[in-house]
């Protein structure tokens, strides 16, 4: 679908909207004594082209505009990767339980918004008092005030001319969410939610901050009310059920000891990474950050150094998933978990706490450069 949406300026004259549609008179002429060649007494049917067979798209199906005091949105399968626009809404609860190409949100006030995975960008413009849950490739705001965002973003989030912005890690579940992440081409392990770039900083002021770690997503964006059309959608804000792992991000770590744990591509790589998170959090260790990236042989040598030779063949099988874990004794605990829980799985685990910080820095500095962060 082409880009048929654009931001509608309130400052423009309404004359354009009030114009009457013009009509065109087509003159027809009749030719007499016309002859039809023998053997061609019937007209050929018009040719059918591929674009003639496409399902007609109604822009209204991909837009929410001028709404107030209502619960609205889209069910799974209604967008199916198309663009979507939300504009001029006030005091609304908006739920988009589907994946989209891009989403723009303009001139909205006092709204609670949940957006399913977005393959490209989500762009908030001229919005105020917004609470939202967002998963996307790119996140941008311009001329916004007082937003609280539970975010999963594959690249560095950008704010511009925006104030009172607060961010937390994505925490959400609905039954189709994992499939929508896959359809949108997003990895649940690539989340830069706390690495905010302020395009217009003000000296001596902070335009953004991080939400308290105790923040619960459903306290900000509650589940749909029982009378709404979304009452049957099963939703959870429990971090243990969240599709995206809950990470500490840029918050200050409580311990100086960290450990790098890397899974190499295999049939159960994602499941194994989730299993590790359950194991370490049960032991009160903290998940700081995660990344899923592809590596080349020269990358392996630079990142893993002395262990590179035994790992080079494994990176040809697909992307690796890396996790930074933190807490006193975390290196010994991770090595024990690797031996007991993943005995037949190819992994890299920091050898000791003296080298573990270097392992973490080597890998995540590489990953950030690989992803252009």
Image: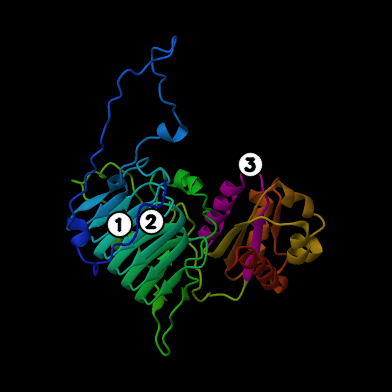
Q: Position of residue 358 (x, y in %)?
A: 70, 72
Residue count near mark 1 (Cα–Cα under 10 Å), binned few <14, some 14–19, many ≥20 = many
Q: Is residue 273 magenta?
A: yes
- The tag earlier along the polypeptide, 3 or 2, is 2
| Proximity of marks 2 and 1: CB atoms separated by less than 8 Å | yes
Alpha carbons under labels 3 and 2: distance apart: 33 Å
Query: Do we see residue 223 in this rendering?
Result: no
Q: Which mark is residue 103?
A: 2
- The tag earlier along the polypeptide, 2 or 1, is 1
197 or 291: which is nearer to us? Answer: 197
253 or 250: which is nearer to us? Answer: 250
272 or 291: which is nearer to us? Answer: 291
| The magenta segment | 258-283
Query: Do we see residue 298 in this rendering?
Result: yes
- The tag earlier along the polypeptide, 3 or 1, is 1
Check the picture and name the quadrant holding the C terminus: bottom right
Examine the rendered structure and indicate whether residue 163 appears above or below residue 339.
below
Examine the rendered structure and indicate whether residue 330 appears above or below residue 321.
below
372 or 349: which is nearer to us? Answer: 372
According to the picture, the residue beneath numbered tag 3 turns out to be: 267
Is 91 left or right of 61, judged from the image as shown?
left
According to the picture, the residue beneath numbered tag 1 turns out to be: 86
Q: Position of residue 38 (x, y in %)?
A: 44, 10
């Amino acid at each position: 679908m082409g880009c048929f949406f654009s931001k509608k300026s309130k400052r423009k004259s309404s004359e354009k909207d009030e114009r009457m549609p013009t009509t065109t008179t087509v003159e027809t002429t009749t030719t007499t004594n016309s002859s039809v060649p023998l053997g061609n007494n019937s007209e050929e049917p018009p040719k059918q082209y591929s674009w003639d067979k496409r399902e007609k798209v109604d822009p209204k199906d991909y837009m929410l505009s001028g709404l107030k005091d209502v619960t609205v949105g889209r069910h799974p399968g209604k967008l199916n990767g198309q663009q979507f626009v939300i504009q001029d809404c006030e005091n609304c609860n908006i739920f988009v339980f589907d994946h989209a190409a891009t989403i723009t949100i303009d001139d909205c006030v006092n709204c609670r918004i949940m957006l399913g995975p977005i393959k490209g960008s989500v762009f908030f413009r001229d919005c105020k008092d917004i609470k939202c849950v967002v998963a996307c490739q790119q996140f941008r705001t311009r001329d916004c005030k007082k937003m609280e965002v539970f975010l999963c973003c594959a690249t560095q989030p950008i704010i511009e001319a925006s104030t009172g912005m607060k961010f937390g890690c994505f925490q959400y579940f609905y039954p189709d969410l994992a499939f929508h992440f896959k359809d949108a081409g997003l990895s649940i392990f690539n989340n830069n939610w706390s690495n905010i770039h302020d395009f217009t900083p003000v000296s001596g002021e902070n335009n953004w901050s991080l939400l308290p770690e105790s923040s619960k997503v459903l306290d900000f964006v509650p589940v749909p009310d029982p009378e709404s059309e979304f009452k049957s959608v099963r939703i959870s804000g429990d971090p243990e059920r969240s599709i995206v792992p809950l990470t500490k991000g840029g918050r200050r770590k409580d311990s100086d000891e960290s450990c790098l744990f890397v899974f190499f591509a295999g049939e159960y790589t994602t499941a194994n990474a989730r299993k590790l998170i359950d194991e370490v959090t049960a032991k009160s260790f903290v998940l700081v950050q995660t990344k899923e990236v592809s590596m080349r042989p020269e990358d392996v040598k630079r990142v893993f150094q002395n262990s590179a030779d035994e790992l080079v063949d494994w990176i040809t099988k697909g992307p690796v998933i890396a996790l930074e874990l933190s807490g006193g004794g975390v290196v010994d605990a991770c090595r024990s978990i690797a031996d007991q829980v993943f005995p037949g799985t190819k992994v890299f685990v920091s050898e000791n706490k003296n080298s573990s910080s270097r392992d973490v820095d080597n890998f995540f500095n590489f990953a950030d450069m690989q992803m252009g962060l």
